Image (spheres, grey):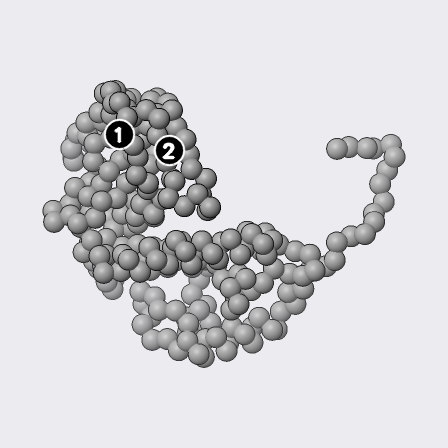
Amino acid sequence: MKNQWITRRVFYFVLLLILALFASSCDSPEKEVSMDQSETLYNEADFIYSNELVKSKGVTLFKDWPEYVQPLKQDYVYTAPELINDPGADLLVKAFRYSYNARGVVIVPNKLNGKNTAIIVVHPWGVDDNLGYSPPEPAGIALFCTPEKNKVYQKHVKDVLVPFLDAMRDHVRFVGYSLTGTEDEIRKTMYKSIDNKTINTKSGLEKFKAFKNSKNLMGKPVIRDFKLSRGRRTL
């Protein structure tokens, strides 16, 4: 397999790094120690994880970008001991989970070595971006449904995602994107992959444009009237 450094462990780190995008700073309220014993991680082949939770009161999570993600106000959250601590770690990544036993959000800090870490953007959609598809008109939905909502998505990508990726490129081993389906000829021409390093973006865009123009992407208008039964009125 090519690029053997991309191990299963790296792909596990991906989830943690995506969650790190939304990690926010918290206040330092009163703390107390709790033990979520039912969720203690134990594997004889590995190690015993001491799941000692530190409780913080009056915390607001995800407050970095309130115009895109609504801040989450919590009466309390828990901080768990670090789960991953790589030798030579230079990245601090927070993972979030909800514990029904502790009845609260649990934040798990992790220290990763960027040289062994990948960031994967999951399925970025090219809709309403002046290049890919557009929602069918005069009535139809795609991606976040309406063109107005798609504009918010595109602005979020521009304001948050792209700067985050640019800031991390020099600190991680690999930045990649996952696409739905299989590697068809058009996308193979446009995008590099693990097995494909040769691309021709101009040719790929021409092929995609021809493919898009060959399809009827127009939507039907909203139905003006339709027949209803007086005896079967249901809301």
Q: Which residue type does callout 2 highlight? A: Thr
Identified at 16% across, 35% down, the residue is 46
Q: Quadrant of residue 1?
A: bottom left
Looking at the picture, tell me which residue is in the foreground, 134 or 176: 134
Judge from the rendering whether residue 34 lies leftward or rightward of residue 152; answer left or right: left
Q: Which residue type does callout 1 highlight? A: Ser
Pointer 2 local density, CA inside 10 Å: few below 14, some 14–19, many at least 20? some
Looking at the picture, tell me which residue is in the foreground, 26 or 139: 26
Q: Quadrant of the C terminus?
A: top right
**Mark carried by residue 60:** 2
List the single residue furthest toward the right.
230
Q: Quadrant of residue 158?
A: bottom left
Judge from the rendering whether residue 216 lies leftward or rightward of residue 201; answer left or right: right
Judge from the rendering whether residue 144 lies leftward or rightward of residue 35; answer left or right: right
Residue 3 percent location from the top left of the image: 23, 62
List the single residue furthest toward the left.
87
**Mark carried by residue 28:** 1
Above/below status of 185 relative to 168? below
Above/below status of 129 relative to 110? below
> Can residue 121 be seen from the camera position used here?
yes
Judge from the rendering whether residue 46 lies leftward or rightward of residue 71; answer left or right: left
**Mark carried by residue 19:** none
Looking at the picture, tell me which residue is in the foreground, 230 or 74: 74
Query: Regarding mark 1 in the picture, which secondary structure is present there?
Result: loop
Residue 227 percent location from the top left of the image: 85, 45
Identified at 18% across, 56% down, the residue is 115
Q: Quadrant of residue 150?
A: bottom right
> Can residue 100 be seen from the camera position used here?
no
Above/below status of 144 relative to 169? above
Give whichever of discs 2 and 1 has the lower sequence position.
1
Residue 44 percent location from the top left of the image: 16, 31
